[in-house]
Image (tube, rainbow, N blue to C red):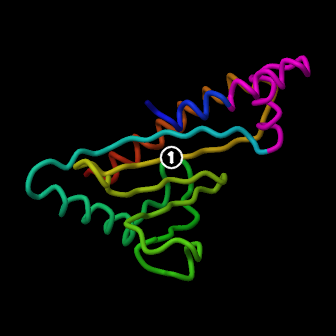
Amino acid sequence: RDKDGMSAALVFCDLVETLRRRGATVWDRLVELWSETGIWASTQTSIRQEGPDGMAAMAAAVEGVALNPPARVEGLEVTSVTDYRVGEEERPFWLGAQDLIELLFEDGGRALVRPSGTEPKLKIYVDLTTPVGNDPLTEQAELGERARSVADALAREIGR
């Protein structure tokens, strides 16, 4: 029933066959991409905000991050903060005001904080990057664990 999923599966099968003809695998291609862009890991965590005061709590949390962002999260220095609710000159021209705060980290990673549009949750997304090394698959798994640690630390900071 999921047309997008079916289309994605078809394109993925085409990719697998193209790589097979080159004598490569999907993992080989992923490592190629990582060598061009660096290794990336992403994760998401949520803080539930139930009850009649949930919406106000989420708005207050977003406001709190915008007005008093952490200087560091799990040892990563926060180098800039973008409040997508305001500051038209700072966000992409095609993006209108959003209930979203972006924290950029010293290493090129970022964290995004926003309320869910469908659930009583404050969402925290973390994307981290590192250059590819000798063991990219292990490095990506470790980076994923680091991203989870950063997301959890930021949730604790916001949820206090």
Region of the chain picked out in magenta, as a range: 11-36
Question: Is residue 90 shown above or below 51?
Answer: below
Residue 125, horizontal then vertical, whole percent: 46, 48
Given the current orientation, which residue lies at the most extreme left position? 52
When asked about the image quadrant of residue 16, the answer is: top right
Residue 122, horizontal then vertical, whole percent: 30, 51
Using a 10 Å C-alpha cutoff, classify the residue at mark 1 as few (fewer than 14 neighbours), some (14 to 19) or many (20 or more): many
The residue located at (46%, 71%) in the rendering is: 84
When asked about the image quadrant of residue 70, the answer is: bottom left
The residue located at (80%, 29%) in the rendering is: 29
Total label count? 1
Query: Which of the two residues, 24 or 74, is positioned nearer the viewer here?
Result: 24
Q: Is residue 17 left or right of residue 97?
A: right
Q: Is residue 75 magenta?
A: no
Q: Which residue is mark 1?
A: 126
Residue 48, horizontal then vertical, whole percent: 23, 45
Q: Is residue 54 left or right of residue 159?
A: left
Query: Of the residues shown, which amino acid type is indicated by label 1?
Result: Val
Question: Is residue 7 shown above or below 48?
Answer: above
| Main secondary structure of the magenta stretch | helix
Query: Which of the two residues, 129 or 119, is positioned nearer the viewer here?
Result: 119
The residue located at (53%, 38%) in the rendering is: 4
Residue 130, horizontal then vertical, whole percent: 70, 41
Q: Is residue 146 left or right of residue 26?
A: left
Secondary structure found at label 1 = strand
Question: Is residue 131 shown above or below 31?
Answer: below
The residue located at (56%, 32%) in the rendering is: 144
Question: Is residue 6 shown above or below 100?
Answer: above
Quadrant in which the N terminus appears? top left
Q: Is residue 22 left or right of residue 41?
A: right
